Image (cartoon, rainbow, N blue to C red):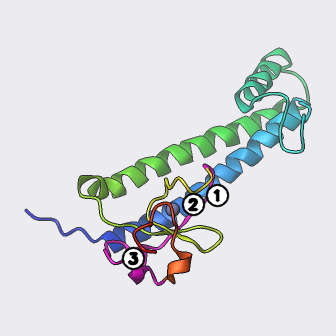
Amino acid sequence: MITFVDPKRIDRQLSQLSIQRWELVDQIAFTYNMIHNAIEDRMISSTRWALSDSAAEAALISQLIDTASSPRVSECSEILRHLLQLRADLFDLDETFSRIEGPYYEHPWPRTFVDRTGTIHAAASCDGLPLDARLGWLPEVSGETDMKAAGGRSSMLCTHCLPQFP
Ligand SMILES: [Zn+2]
């Protein structure tokens, strides 16, 4: 049996999932901030806590064990429960993502992404991007071999991953 693979349809789904994924990642970061606050961790710069996220989580858990009768126990255990739920959601989302992306790994097709500056990339793992770059997908041109189909002027094409289009 031959299954018809539609790159645009698959990448449209993955595009939506990747937006949901960033939302979950942001919620997890926000929850970790609540944990750092709950254990009265201190900030060592405007964005960094003294403890790592996992150390802060471990500290909160041991506080819960040591002070099981304190009035803040229900608040702290609620934060932990929320974190566990978000992590489970992220795990499920990643499983779904991998399942839907399966056909791409069997027979990859051209893909196009856009960064915050509007520059178009052929790979989410492009060397020209910072590691934490959040890219938009352009699923409507997935599977197209002509990069000009990405609708970009050549000045908008990344010189790292699309150097063949000067
Ligand atoms: Zn690039």
* Residue occupying the far top of the picture: 66
Residue 38 location, quadrant = top right
Which residue position holds label 1? 23
In-front residue for pair 41/123: 123
Q: CA distance from mark 1 to mark 2?
A: 5 Å
Dividing the picture into quadrants, the one containing residue 146 is bottom left
Question: In terms of secondary structure, where does tag 1 sit?
Answer: helix
Q: Is 84 rendered above or below residue 90? A: above
Q: Is residue 104 above or below residue 84?
A: below
The answer to whether the residues at label 1 and label 2 have Cβ atoms under 8 Å apart is yes
Label 2 element class: helix
Residue extending farthest to the front is 166
User: Residue at (35%, 58%) from the top-left corner?
Assistant: 100
Point out residue 138 in the picture as x, y percentages from the top left corner: 47, 73
164 displayed left or right of 43:
left
Which percent across, then down, holds residue 128? 56, 57
- Image point 52% across, 60% down: which residue? 18
Marked residue nearer the N-terminal end (2 or 3): 2
Q: What is the three-letter code of the residue carrying label 2?
A: Gln
Kind of residue at disc 1: Glu
Q: Which residues make up the magenta segment?
A: 131-151
Q: Which of the labelled discs sits on residue 36, or is there none? A: none
Which residue is disc 2 drawn over? 20
Judged from the image, the secondary structure of the residue bearing numbered disc 3 is: helix
Q: CA distance from mark 3 to mark 1?
A: 29 Å
Q: Label 3 amino acid?
A: Met
In the image, residue 111 above or below residue 59: below
Which quarter of the figure is the N terminus placed in?
bottom left
**Which residue carries the number 3 mark?**
147
